Image (cartoon, rainbow, N blue to C red):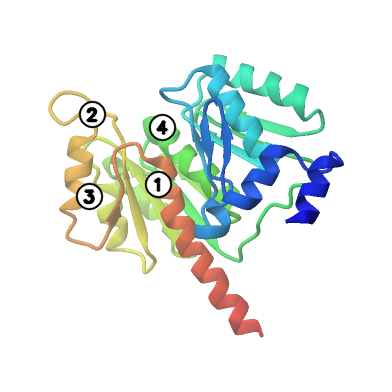
Amino acid sequence: MRELLDAVADGDVSPAEAEARLNGYATTEAGRFDAAREERTGVPEAVLADGKTTAEVADLAATAVETTGRALCTRVDDPTAETVTTALAEEFPDSNVEYDERARTLVAHAPAFDPPALDADVGVVAAGTADAAAAGEAATTLTEMGARVTRVSDVGVAGLHRTIDALADLRAMDVLVVAAGREGALPTVLAGLVDVPIIGLPVASGYGHGGAGEAALAGMLQSCAPVTVVNVDAGYAAGVQAGLVARSVDSARTDGRR
């Protein structure tokens, strides 16, 4: 501890970084950032922008970069992305910031950040174009967890030949995240055709009764083929679940090479 205190006194370690090392979290005016989550669970902490002011998101994102070398923000709108990008550029001039407007994700890496790399392939499948936002959130999460991500888009069951055409690529994956709205049939169909775990991601696309994702959620939960299901539009959760499978695959392959 004395070494850490000396490093703070010398300006080599910030108070927030020291708090994160000691407590596992860093306290800001916007809340507490769980800096030890990835070390503890293998899952990178994410800053949910919904319900927060742009200043609060920027504060937490900066704390994330300061304490872990990376910030992963979800449900980010354009004004928030602009505020966060400007704030990070001022505080960490050499950091790299990427904003995906469709997926509503923002990722920032400090120059010295060493991203994880898993020997595992994850397919992120979107039934239709309307499902791309939720699928994109999952893909960003998986990329940050170190998986190799392959995006497969617009292969919904309304044109089953599109699904069949993509089967060879999907069967080569270690795990699939399948995003679908309307009745949510695609994960069930694929679960009967491939021999890899499937994470069903119901999407609030559609209209009328069940059009806010309820029908897709119910359909996936009632699947007669084995599908693991997350909540409606929960791209981050789906990405995390698939990422944990990818970590296990990577671990098994690493052990097999020893």
**Residue 10 drawn at (x, y percent):** 87, 41
189 over 234 or under it: above or below: below
Mark identifier at residue 39? none
**Residue 137 drawn at (x, y percent):** 48, 38
Pointer 4: what residue?
A: 129
Judged by depth in the image, the label closer to the viewer, 1 or 4, is 1
Going from N to C along the chain, the mark reached first, 2 or 3, is 2
Judged by depth in the image, the label closer to the viewer, 1 or 2, is 1
The amino acid type found where label 3 is placed reads: Met
Label 2 crowding class (10 Å Cα cut-off): few <14, some 14-19, many 20+?
A: some
- Measure the C-alpha gap from mark 4 to mark 2: 16 Å
Pointer 3: what residue?
A: 220
Asked if marks 1 and 4 touch (Cβ < 8 Å), the reply is no
Pointer 2: what residue?
A: 212
**Who is closer to the viewer here, 167 or 203?**
203
- Measure the C-alpha gap from mark 3 to mark 1: 16 Å
Going from N to C along the chain, the mark reached first, 4 or 2, is 4
